[in-house]
Image (spheres, helix red, strand yellow):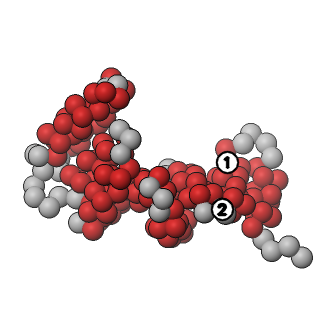
């Protein structure tokens, strides 16, 4: 869409905390009104609607919309939003008992070009892995993501993260 539309979407999201749980439908209606301005078939519509359902506690309604947005070319329209959709879809899948699918969706993102979402990829993937009883792998991802942000012990934490998943001699 255009920058004006993107700005209005951002402004709507900036008001999200003003909607208590009992007014969640009102917030979703604000997003729906913005989505109605989009041309038919735009992947931005289902993405924004998925975010609204997800943020108001309905992973079951969000997951199909994230899938629709990705299938409609969200990653091509906006690589950043496409990556966000994969992270958020994986989280929703975990919430509805489909963590294995979340792992399959996010694992390739570990090798994607680096951006500010790298740590979110690792955090969400770690949660999916933990839901599958693969806690050591999840902890390794989280420690690996945390290590560069520490004021000290970066090398030690990165080594500990690798050691969690390396085969023992």
Can you give x and y, in whole percent of width and height, for residue 132 in the image? 60, 63
Q: Nearer the viewer, residue 155 or 26?
A: 26
Distance from label 2 to label 1 (Cα)? 21 Å
Q: Is residue 16 left or right of residue 102?
A: left
- The residue at the point 72 percent across, 42 percent down is 150
Can you give x and y, in whole percent of width and height, for residue 167 in the image? 80, 74
State which quarter of the image contains the C terminus.
bottom right
Q: Is residue 129 left or right of residue 32?
A: right
Q: Is residue 9 left or right of residue 151?
A: left
- Residue occupied by mark 1: 146
Q: Nearer the viewer, residue 110 or 26?
A: 26
Can you give x and y, in whole percent of width and height, for residue 139 in the image? 70, 55
- The residue at the point 78 percent across, 63 percent down is 164
- The residue at the point 66 percent across, 62 percent down is 133
- Residue occupied by mark 2: 133
Assign a secondary structure to mark 1: helix
């Amino acid at each position: 869409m255009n920058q004006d539309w993107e700005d209005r979407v951002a402004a709507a999201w900036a008001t999200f905390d003003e909607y208590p749980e009992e007014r969640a439908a009102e917030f979703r209606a604000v997003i729906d009104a913005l989505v109605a301005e989009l041309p038919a078939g735009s992947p931005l519509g289902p993405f924004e609607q998925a975010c609204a359902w997800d943020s108001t506690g309905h992973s079951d309604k969000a997951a199909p919309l994230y899938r629709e947005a990705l299938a409609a070319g969200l990653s091509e329209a906006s690589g950043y939003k496409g990556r966000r959709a994969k992270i958020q879809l994986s989280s929703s899948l975990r919430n509805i008992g489909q963590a294995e699918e979340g792992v399959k969706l996010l694992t390739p993102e570990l090798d994607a070009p680096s951006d500010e979402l790298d740590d979110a990829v690792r955090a969400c993937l770690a949660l999916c892995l933990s839901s599958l009883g693969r806690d050591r792998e999840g902890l390794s991802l989280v420690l690996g993501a945390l290590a560069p942000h520490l004021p000290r012990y970066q090398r030690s934490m990165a080594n500990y993260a690798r050691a969690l998943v390396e085969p023992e001699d």
